[in-house]
Amino acid sequence: METISIPKGFRVTPEQFEQLASTEQLARLELTKTGELIIMSPTGGTAGRKNSRLTQQLRNWADRDGTGEVFDSSTLFVLPNGARRSPDVSWIKLERWNQLTQSQQDGFPPIAPDFVIELVSPSDLKNQRYEDLQAKMQEYLDNGVKLGWLIEPEAKTVEIYRSQSSVEILNHPQTLSGENVLPGFSLDLTEIFSN
């Protein structure tokens, strides 16, 4: 197998990105609004298990609620600023999702979710990518996301990002409220904060 080394700050066009992303052998990819290609390694077992729990809790609520669609970390969204991003967990109001054509839904949806979760993984901490995740959360807000949670299991903290508000930091919360974006949704952090 041939390996390639991509220099930091390497830029590609949206068309080149689409070609790279459709190649099955590559890890998850994202593209910044300036065309910087971000290659994300697969998650380890602990982060994968916790991501699954986050998705499961939101999916269970969404099935009962019926007002929106839930997406996992493999879904890539084309944000209004042109960036291509894959939140760990996301949710879109059904009426907004249904405004997309079938082709848009089948491809990389050109829409910003209403709600996103990013989970800080051990590799994020090891590779000092926490500030990148914070910038990504701000980018989500700048592109129309209404509520976002950046969850750091090791420190047991959550940064809450709301449109037109300062970031709120919670230490050791047991649950998180979906507020007016996800009315009635409460995320139990017990398993997320456990080892």
Image: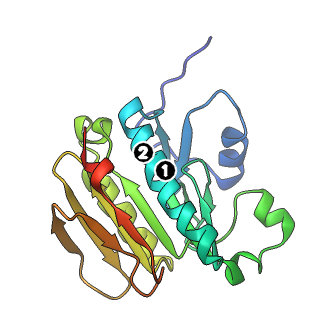
Query: Foreground residue, 168 or 76?
Result: 168
Residue at left offset 48%, top offset 31%? 6
Q: Are marks 2 and 1 in contact (CB under 8 Å)?
A: yes
Lower sequence index among marks 2 and 1: 2
Disc assigned to residue 192:
none
In the picture of the structure, the residue carrying the numbered disc 1 is 36
Q: List x then y, in percent, for residue 87.
A: 49, 57
Q: Is residue 163 visible?
A: yes
Query: How many numbered marks, from 0 up?
Result: 2
Residue at left offset 33%, top offset 56%? 133
Residue at left offset 72%, top offset 40%? 22
In the picture of the structure, the residue carrying the numbered disc 2 is 9
Determine crowd level at label 2: few under 14, some 14-19, many 20+ residues with C-alpha closer than 10 A: few
Splitting the image into 4 quarters, where does residue 188 fall? bottom left
Above or below, 104 relative to 65: above
Which secondary structure, mark 2?
loop
Above or below, 192 relative to 23: below
- Amino acid type assigned to the residue bearing label 1 in the image: Glu
Tell me if 167 is positioned left or right of 15 in this view: left
Q: List x then y, in percent, for residue 19.
A: 73, 42
Query: Foreground residue, 108 or 181?
Result: 181
- Amino acid type assigned to the residue bearing label 2 in the image: Gly
Tell me if 34 is positioned left or right of 100 in this view: left
Splitting the image into 4 quarters, where does residue 50 fall? top left
